[in-house]
Amino acid sequence: MTTAIPIRPRRLRGSPALRKMLREVTLSPADFIYPIFVTSGRGLRRPIPALAGQCRLSPDEAAALAAEVWRLGVGALLLFGIPDYKDAVGSSGADPEGPVQEAIRAIKKAVPEMLLITDVCLCEYTDHGHCGLIREGLVDNDATLPHLAAQALSHARAGADMVAPSDMMDGRVAAIRAVLDSEGYSRLPIMAYSVKYASAFYGPFREAAGSAPRFGDRQSYQMDPARRLEARLEADLDIAEGADLVMVKPAGPYLDIIREIRDRCARPLAAYQVSGEYAMLMAAAGAGLLDEKAAALESLTAIKRAGADLILTYLAPQAARWLREAS
Ligand code: PBG
């Protein structure tokens, strides 16, 4: 007579070495894109109170920082400009001597291999703080497109490796693609902020970039957090218009959306761990409520596990340091 062997489901334990081998997700400094804020001047590294550990940098200091983070294994930067002047149409964004354009040249001289991505939007450059032109109190989508394309072209001429429109106007990817192609930049890729929710988590960024809207909010052009299906539509439209990479933003509160887009689109997918996510983590760690390193690496692991190929994060240099120590 045989006795049945009781089968008991069992979670794999084993040695630390085995557990390490079985990890499905491994973070690497090469996954990160580090967002930085550049301004005109020389020798400036001005701390940003809303974003502990981040600074507004003049082009020469941006180049020095680029060299530092390159040594840590971080190979890409996202540049935001803080201009000297603002007007109704954000024309300083396309100024060939603007801070982003100057910073691109300075960084390329110091670290030629560093991948430089520029944020393309009007909100940092308009006196009203909206991402598009205003007509009769409303954002005029179509009138905005040529201004975005002009800014993207000026970044390309300064030497940017990729442009990243974050404005959320309809048709901006196609408008930027057309201008880049006709001006000899058909090989320059576009990373579209395709799935960008109207999020409270952008608060610290708007202080850092001086880009809070003077009136109203961004709900007419950014997405409703309560809508999932629209994310598919936005990603599909941007890809149809010529986006080479797509992005989901914010990241941590939208892991389901990252997975949704990953499973649906064959384009490389970036996710942006935004200023509010970073500020929350730093504040909680600063108050002794969280272990900064463990919580930071866990948040990044979760974003990668959800399906992001690339992660835009203010934690990039510090996380790269921690990953190096661990390896
Ligand atoms: C510009 C832009 C914003 C962010 C990236 N590009 C702000 C906004 O949409 O208001 C937010 C980034 C962050 O919070 O870290 N349109």
Image (spheres, rainbow, N blue to C red):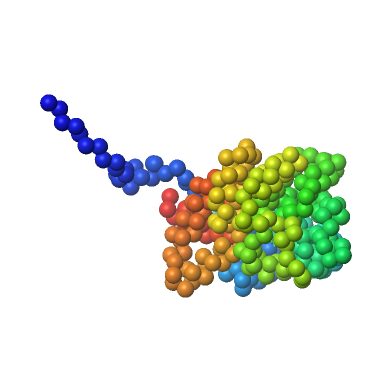
Residue extending furthest left?
A: 1
**In the foreground, 52 or 260:** 260
Q: Is residue 147 left or right of residue 220?
A: right
Give residue 25's position: percent from left, percent from top.
47, 45
The answer to whether residue 28 is visible is: no
**In the foreground, 4 or 324:** 4
Give residue 309's position: percent from left, percent from top.
57, 45
Which residue occupies 72% across, 68% down?
Answer: 212
Is 5 above or below relative to 121? above
Which residue occupies 64% across, 67% down?
Answer: 203
Give residue 185's position: percent from left, percent from top.
80, 42
Q: Is residue 181 left or right of residue 309?
A: right
Residue extending furthest top?
A: 1
**In the foreground, 44 or 22:** 22
Where is the N terminus found, in terms of image quarters?
top left
The quadrant in which residue 213 appears is bottom right
* Number of numbered discs: 0
Which residue occupies 51% across, 65% down?
Answer: 281
Which quadrant contains ligand 1?
A: bottom right
The quadrant in which residue 252 appears is bottom right
The answer to whether residue 296 is visible is: yes
Give residue 271's position: percent from left, percent from top.
60, 51
Which residue occupies 81% across, 69% down?
Answer: 127
**In the foreground, 71 or 200:** 200
